[in-house]
Amino acid sequence: MRMYTPGMLLSLWVPALAATFLGVGATSLPTPAPKKVCTSLRVGSAGRTGKDTRPPLIQLSTSVDKFSPGQNITVSLNGRPGVQVQRFAVQAREVNSFYSVGTFVNQPTAAQTIGCSHQNDTIVGIPGNATATTNLTLTWAAPNDTDIGDVEFIANVRQVGEKNWASLKSRQVRQLAPDFSPINMTECGTVKGCFRYGKKDCTAETCTYAMSYRIEGDNAIFELAADTDGWVAVGFSSDRMMNGDDVLACVNARKGRRVVYRHYYNNHHRPALQDNNPIIGNGAMVKDGRIYCRFTRPRKVDNDNYSVDLDATWFFLYAWGPASEGNMMRHTLESPPTSYRKVVITLKVDDQRDSSDPTTTVNMLLLCSTVLLSQFLQQ
């Protein structure tokens, strides 16, 4: 979770709120925003910037209490009779976080959108153009992420004739759960390849771990499920030993309200998050303590040394485990299962492992011991 100091928050509120009350038709400031704005939340010289502790005379409201990814929401600042706004700043944030989300897509007169966490996430009034207004309407566009979590709008506003800034907060706006069609494991071995760890013929809802893959043009589509509300992943390795591997993961980043898709390069048991992420999310869900996700990944990623060519043969690695604040913790099993041999994604196998069968664990440990001995003899 990205964190800001109180001073940084103040600087974000004031600029954004200033734009909201100043009218329609200004151009955007360069992004990222000046540090002075994002760290002090002051627009121009405004005298004292203390917090007004009186009941607010201005209301910050939203047109809806629920939203879907990509949806536009109307955000309004309305003053009581006789109350006019001189300066303001408005921003949307994930609930219980200082990280701003979404973008403002209209700009009132003498106002500008700026970038603090990302481009156009904050709207502020332009210093020197503080046109007083009673009512202001903004349009905020939710990001297209599969699940960003619930949000609330934050505003700092200064009334005409006042020196202090009043802090405002809207009601929480809940993000609707994304549609997620069930993972069909009856197609394993015919339409798509699969790996299942659990009881025989278990489903995505009952397997301890389940993974399916299929080809669609130049892409591979993966589906993952696991008996955890933390993270689930599939990796591709040349030696099974989790060293120098391409790992694709779905991670619960906000206690069931947001699943993010992440690309790691695993080097000596230390997965490093990659800036270049070839994953395209097709839906995710955390339900009844289980995580599910579906994503697309190009079979071959150009100009990326960390993304393997899926048309080659690889050992598949299967892992899952808990997460903390969106960070992957150690995998649940001491020795996570792998494919018995190298696999190519055009091969529609249905590999099932009985997690209650002691021989499954023995085979896994024997496999790891054999590989370790082989590496030792090569030194």
Image (spheres, rainbow, N blue to C red):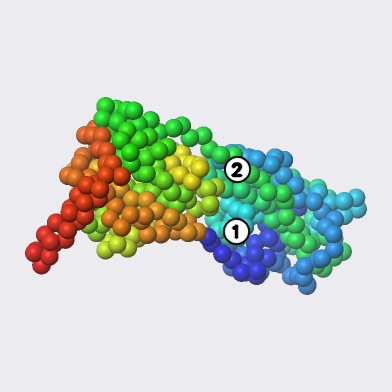
Q: Toward the viewer: 319 or 118?
A: 319
The reply to whether residue 39 is visible in this rendering is no
In the image, which disc is placed on residue 175?
Answer: 2
Q: Is residue 265 left or right of residue 311?
A: right
Q: CA distance from mark 1 to mark 2?
A: 15 Å
Q: Earlier in the sequence, mark 1 or mark 2?
A: 1
Q: Toward the viewer: 95 or 108?
A: 95
Q: Is residue 321 left or right of residue 324?
A: left
Q: Toward the viewer: 229 or 283?
A: 229
What residue is at 40 percent from the left and 38 percent from the top? 206
Q: State the image coordinates of residue 143 (x, y, percent, origin top left).
A: 55, 45
Residue at numbered disc 1: 97
- Against 372, residue 225 (above or below) is above
Q: State the image coordinates of residue 379 (x, y, percent, origin top left).
A: 10, 67
Q: Is residue 285 left or right of residue 37?
A: left
- Against 27, residue 14 (above or below) is below
Please identify the residue farthest to the right as the structure is shown: 82
What residue is at 33 percent from the left and 38 percent from the top? 199
